[in-house]
Amino acid sequence: MTLFFNKRLFLACLLTFCGISSFVLAQSNANSPYSIFGIGDMVHPTNVNSLGMGGIGLSFTNQLNVNTLNPALLSRNNTNTIFDAGSIFERKILTNNKGQQRDFGGNLSYMAFVFPLSKRSGMGLGLQPVSKINYQFFSLEKSPDANSFTQYAYLGSGGITQLYLSAGYRIWKGFSLGLQGAYNFGIVKRQAESLVDEPGSIYTVERLRRYNFGAFSGKMGLSYRQKLKEKVYLAFGAVHEFKTSLNASYLYALQRKSASTGLTLISDTLTQDGSKSLKMPASNSLGISLEKTLNYAVGIDFKMHDWSSFDGFDGRDTLKAGYALRVGGEWTPKFTATTGYFKRVTYRLGFCHNLMPIVLNGSQLIDQSLSFGLSLPVIKPTDLYHSFSRINMAFVLGQRGTTDNGLIREQYWRIHLGLNINQMWFLRRKYD
């Protein structure tokens, strides 16, 4: 007897991971005014399947999917090797008491690679965003001592990306532990420009800060799965993310630009190799789910985080403690059906209520969303090499913020598309 190893799949996944990882950094996101706070808009570290269920996944997974929320659940990825990648397309409507603005953006959102180590353990490697920054503010003010106006522009872009390695091990029966180590890196630009609108004024003055991040972080997870009856399980999961110091070097410069061409005429570097450390708080998450293997699953996740002591880029932001509550589930009519394609499709639904740490004008922002999703099989489950690859989709409709107290309301819809290449790489043949 010999082992068959699917080399073509391995090479395709490896080349894809190496070839497109750099594009995760080139994020193109819709304008988000609230990303000026903290380290930007925090990205929920999960995949398309989970997003279709409101983002749950602390206690539930199966051998066919990647779970990036709780490393302990990698212990269930002990047979197949999985490559999972996803992208996002986002449309936003920004509204305040002065008007409305529409924006659109999209980018590759994550990549994950999971493979078995033994019958009790699995390992994962991935690249995913931690935060995204993309804001643009403009204002026009009359100069108090002259018959002229000054236009101000505040711009921010970039974000932080995470390269992680994680592993999970089943210690005893349904009890598993997992660890994840990650390297966080990225570039953030924060600019402030001013232009005086008067005869003879042809320059803009720009204050530029560019931060280069590089820091390690980690989290640990545990899970417990109790069998209730045939193929039906009750599962619990918990994750602790350790407090992290995001260390950065930065450049601070003043620039004079041509108002007509935008070209830099004079640049004065005030700080070349400055240093700054942003302290990200620890967080704790809990989840519970009920699952019937390859048929249905429902779950609830809850996460708490306290940003009240966070020091931002330019001093302490007005941040507080927040939490996220997620509820969702999935259903597959008959996973092993050989006829009737839609019997093998997985259908998902979820809801998220997120009390954000941002407090403005006495109001703490709330982000609420409703999501639904699909997983479409691309190969029958009876194929030669036990492939269960799927095309995944999730659709999210949500709103955060309010127009009360002079604030901005963001209404958004997001389309998440993903590809899951799932295959048993090592097969023992009975005949040579």
Image (cartoon, rainbow, N blue to C red):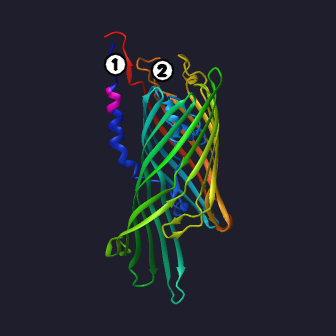
In which quadrant will I find the C terminus?
Answer: top left
Local SS, label 2: loop
Nearer to the camera, 155 or 39: 39
Q: Is residue 368 visible in this depiction of the protein?
A: no
| Residue 90 in sight in this render | yes
Query: What range of the chain is rendered magenta?
Result: 7-11
Secondary structure, mark 1, is strand
* In this view, 300 is above or below 100: above
> Please, is residue 57 above or below residue 423 in the view?
below
Q: Front-most of 396 and 381?
A: 381
Q: Amino acid at mark 1?
A: Leu
Decide if residue 93 is on the left or right side of residue 261.
right
Q: Nearer the viewer, residue 313 or 340?
A: 313
Disc 2 residue type (three-letter): Lys
Q: Which residue is mark 2?
A: 380
Q: Residue at x 52, y 50 (%)?
A: 43
- Quickly name the residue at label 1: 3
Residue 291, magenta (yes or no): no
